[in-house]
Image (cartoon, grey):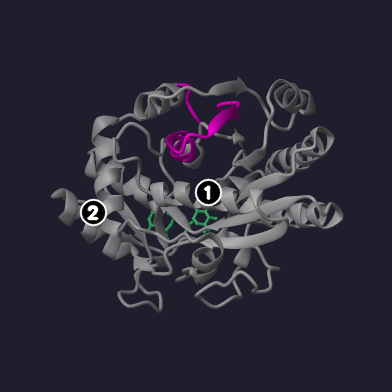
Amino acid sequence: MKVLLTGGAGFIGSHTCVEFLERGWEVVVADNFSNSKPEVLNRIKIITGKSFTFYEADVTQRSALDKIFTEQKIDAVVHFAGYKAVGESVAKPLMYYRNNLDSTITLLEAMETHGVKNLVFSSSATVYGENNPSPYKEDMPLSTCTNPYGWTKLMSEQIMRDAANADSNMSVVLLRYFNPIGAHPSGLIGEDPEGIPNNLFPYVAKVAGGKLPKLGIFGDDYPTEDGTGVRDYIHVVDLAKGHAAALEYAVSHKGIEAVNLGSGKGHSVMEVVTTFSRVNNIPVPYDIKPRRAGDLPSYYANAEKAKTLLNWEVELTLEDMCRDMWKWQTQNPDGY
Ligand code: UFG
């Protein structure tokens, strides 16, 4: 099987690339390094001992996609490419809509022209919005995203649903990620955010590594067990395996399915901080700060559908996420 990974040099894309190569699948990566570094490609080769084809390409450009689909006999696509910072999307909504929707539509058009029928999409639990109760289940109504980034995921899902409904030979799996964190256990690839991280785990790792003085915990007065926010964290290696399971499903079925990739279990910010300190034997100084605008108190997945439909469930724990995150941080204190 030959698979195109758009955004395959990014955090989740690179771990998925490793997983696919280890399964013996042929991989073609398209990435424009808008939020990734060329060095990741070398690291993937070191981990797997395998080679793959790389195109420096912007998937909003139809000519770039036509070149790839003409030169490669692609069986399936995993579409990761897209902007993903929630706060930035509020400040620059048009940039987010233009890039994330253009890439989705352009990719679907190119797939149609070149007869490629199988697609796995990098969606997000953010599509459940603010009104659904946890655990989130795939058949819940989706209607109220809290930021433009979330809307681009919801709109992309809808566009893919309509495209799949119009072509009975298409097969699409929409993967709704919860909170992907951690790194490959080799410590060779991991998350490499530009500047000061927005997300909890990269921030904790930078504080533990002495690159930032203190973590700010955004709110300790939520209606949760210890008052801090609760999320369903998922190890990026488990997530990568979820993509392999989704792809195997896609190539052997027709139609469209949305599937949560989460553990089904929530952990609080305080639990993350204490677990990281304990597992890695390193202090993580913190202050309690006011709540961050737009944050929900608590959410986590109903993970049953992934189990029954894809035969996939998480294997790694919060301890594994903390250990692997720290290995990546200590081996790459300034990223790639
Ligand atoms: N948090 C802190 N301090 C920080 C950063 C985060 O206390 O410095 C807290 C947040 O308040 C929240 C938790 O840690 O309670 C997790 O926050 P993240 O920013 O790591 O993740 P979010 O749940 O806010 O968002 C993530 C992804 C989004 C995605 C969303 C939906 O970043 O892309 O999950 O699943 F849309």
State ligand 1's quadrant: bottom left
Q: Earlier in the sequence, mark 2 or mark 1?
A: 1
Does 67 appear above or below 328?
above
As rendered, which of 205 and 285 lies closer to the eye?
205
At 42% from the left and 64% from the top, the residue drawn is 263
> For the view shown, which residue lies furthest in the left direction?
281
Q: Which residue type does callout 1 highlight?
A: His
As for residue 36 lying within the magenta part, the answer is: yes
Q: Are marks 2 and 1 in contact (CB under 8 Å)?
A: no
Q: Position of residue 144 (x, y in %)?
A: 68, 67
Q: Position of residue 285 (x, y in %)?
A: 21, 52
Q: Residue at x 16, y 56 (%)?
A: 278
Q: Nearer the viewer, mark 2 or mark 1?
A: 1
Which of the 4 image quarters holds residue 220?
A: bottom left
70 versus 164 height, above or below: above
Q: Residues within 10 Å of mark 2 (few under 14, many from 20)?
A: many
Query: Is residue 148 in view from this perspective?
Result: no
Q: Nearer the viewer, residue 190 or 88?
A: 190
Total labels drawn:
2
**Which range is magenta?**
14-38
At x 46%, y 46%, the residue is 240
Callout 1 secondary element: helix
Left/right placement of residue 55 relative to residue 109 reads: left
Residue 333 in sight here: yes
Q: At numbered mark 2, what does the secondary structure look like: helix, strand or loop? A: helix
Asked whether, in this view, residue 298 is left or right of residue 170, the answer is left
The disc placed on residue 276 is 2
**Magenta segment includes 251:** no
Query: What amino acid does circle 2 point to?
Result: Phe
Residue 243's label in the rendered image is: 1
Cα gap from disc 2 to disc 1, whole angstroms: 27 Å
